[in-house]
Amino acid sequence: MNRPARTSPLSLTARIASVAVLLAGLTACANQTLLSPVHLENYDPQDLFYLANKGPVLTEVVGNPFDESKLLVDNRVTSAMTGANFFPKLTFDTKVPPEQNSPYHVIVVLDAAGNTRPERLCANPRDADRPEASHSPGDAFRIVAVYCVNDRRLSSISGTAPRPDNARDPRFVNLIRQATLNLFPTDNPDRRDENRLRRLQ
């Protein structure tokens, strides 16, 4: 008699998390928020445990589209990001102790220009800089976020959403949380053994 294949708890958790990310993405689309994640083969979910143990992940917030201080906006971003991924829960901050000495960091670009290229941001965050521009209330708000190790991209997220009024706007907080959730999935299909073998054949 054939026995049903067993699923490891970690694998089951990863699958549940993947479904949850998909549902979050569908909810985002329903709210006119469109996010496109990219996870490269060198993105390893196991690295998240290292990040969680090291302390806050160094986060650089580029841009300030609101009539609020840069410090306040940066703090709103890292506060919304903290705990927004599945497991292990990560914290984020714009400043970390020098002794932390971690090669991992995140760059978040607010109201990014249309030509902002995620693949270039890890090596040169200033690539996202642009002059201040005026926006009408109906203009979409574009966000780009990149998870890096040194100057290499591991994953990224880009997308658009209805323009929030300020950094306290629940729509803005929800956008940042959705972006964080998609930036740090608990599974990377490209790293599964069967997929690696298939590519080698």
Image: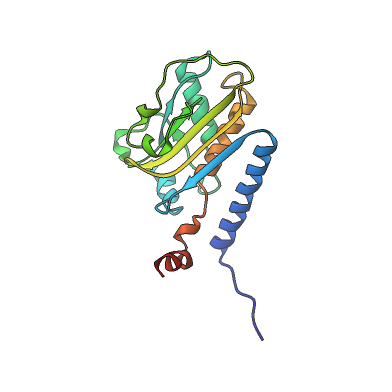
Of the pair 137 and 88, the residue shown nearer to us:
137
Q: Residue at x 50, y 48 (%)?
A: 88
> According to the image, what is the colour scheme of the structure?
rainbow
Instruction: Please give left or right for residue 148 compared with residue 90 in the image.
Output: left
Residue 201 spot, x, y in % from top left: 41, 70
User: Going by the picture, which residue comes out furthest to the bottom?
Assistant: 1
| Quadrant showing the N terminus | bottom right
Q: Residue at x 56, y 16 (%)?
A: 135
Instruction: Please give left or right for residue 107 compared with residue 84 in the image.
Output: left
Residue 78 spot, x, y in % from top left: 49, 31
Counting every numbered tag in the picture gives 0
**Residue 160 occupies which quadrant of the picture?**
top right
Residue 90 spot, x, y in % from top left: 48, 42
Q: Residue at x 66, y 47 (%)?
A: 23
Q: Residue at x 42, y 54 (%)?
A: 41
Instruction: Please give left or right for residue 66 compared with residue 104 in the image.
Output: right
Of the pair 131 and 183, the residue shown nearer to us:
131
Please determine whether, in this image, residue 38 is positioned above or below residue 13.
above
Of the pair 46 and 62, the residue shown nearer to us:
62
